[in-house]
Image: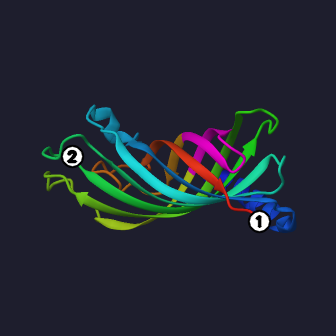
Amino acid sequence: MKTIFIIVFTFSLSFVSNLESISQTYIGIYSGVAQGIDESSQRGNQGFERIIGGSIVYNLKNKSRIASELSIFYTSIGTNGYSGDNDYHTSIITGDLRVRYFFNRDLLMSPYIGAGLGISFFQNNIRPLNLANPFQQSFGAFVSAPIFVGMIYPISKSVDFDIQVGPILTNTDLLNPIINDTYDHWFYARVGLYFNVSK
């Protein structure tokens, strides 16, 4: 977590110091699927839930290899059924700052890797029936850190298609009913459209 913070902080300083060179600003909307991939996935009843959100992406230059993104999104994770001792459903709202590194901007389909850091708020909508092992609390906040890979494909001069996948790490163990020394995290895959709103 500390390494991710240092990387994001360094890229953010670079972004702020080069504000005058920003030539493109994109506003995007996206949706996809999410799945908890920590302890409860071992029970074999993890279901695919949804993710939906939007973001503003700043490209420092047309051919810059680094882009900064401010993203806000909703995620739900949980099990397929809600009748067992360890079944659950948790809603999460996240705001984070992300940086993308593009390997080659000259390609029609531009692949990238990235990382970020943000704050998330969770609400346990359905708690387990096993009263001997309840969630320690049903709502709260935590630090989240996405790590991802993706690809941008231009549909037109002003619209880009984006696909992104990766895990989101956290510093909490309160997102599912299994409480131990391992922090919870989840995996996501999303697709979106980004619109150039630069003057």
Mark 1, Cα crowd under 10 Å, few <14 / some 14-19 / many 20+, is: few
Residue 135 in sight in this render = no
Horizontal side, residue 147 vs residue 134: left or right: right
Q: State yes or no: residue 154 in magenta.
A: yes
Q: Which mark is residue 45?
A: none
Instruction: State which region is magenta.
Output: 146-165
Horizontal side, residue 89 vs residue 153: left or right: left
Residue 11 falls in which quadrant of the image? Answer: bottom right
Q: Earlier in the sequence, mark 1 or mark 2?
A: 2
Q: Which residue is mark 2?
A: 87
Q: Nearer the viewer, residue 116 or 152?
A: 152
Mark 1 lies on a secondary structure that is: loop
Residue shown at 78% from the left, 37% from the top: 103
Q: Nearer the viewer, residue 107 or 47?
A: 107
Residue 69, placed above or below residue 109: below
Residue 16, placed above or below residue 148: below
Please state the horizontal and vertical placement of residue 199, each as a whole percent of the image.
Answer: 77, 65
Mark 2 lies on a secondary structure that is: loop
Residue shown at 13% from the left, 52% from the top: 129
Residue 132 falls in which quadrant of the image? Answer: bottom left
Separation (CA) of disc 1 from disc 2 = 50 Å
Please state the horizontal and vertical placement of residue 193, each as a whole percent of the image.
Answer: 57, 48
Q: Which mark is residue 199?
A: 1
Residue 89, placed above or below residue 118: above
Residue 169 in sight in this render = yes
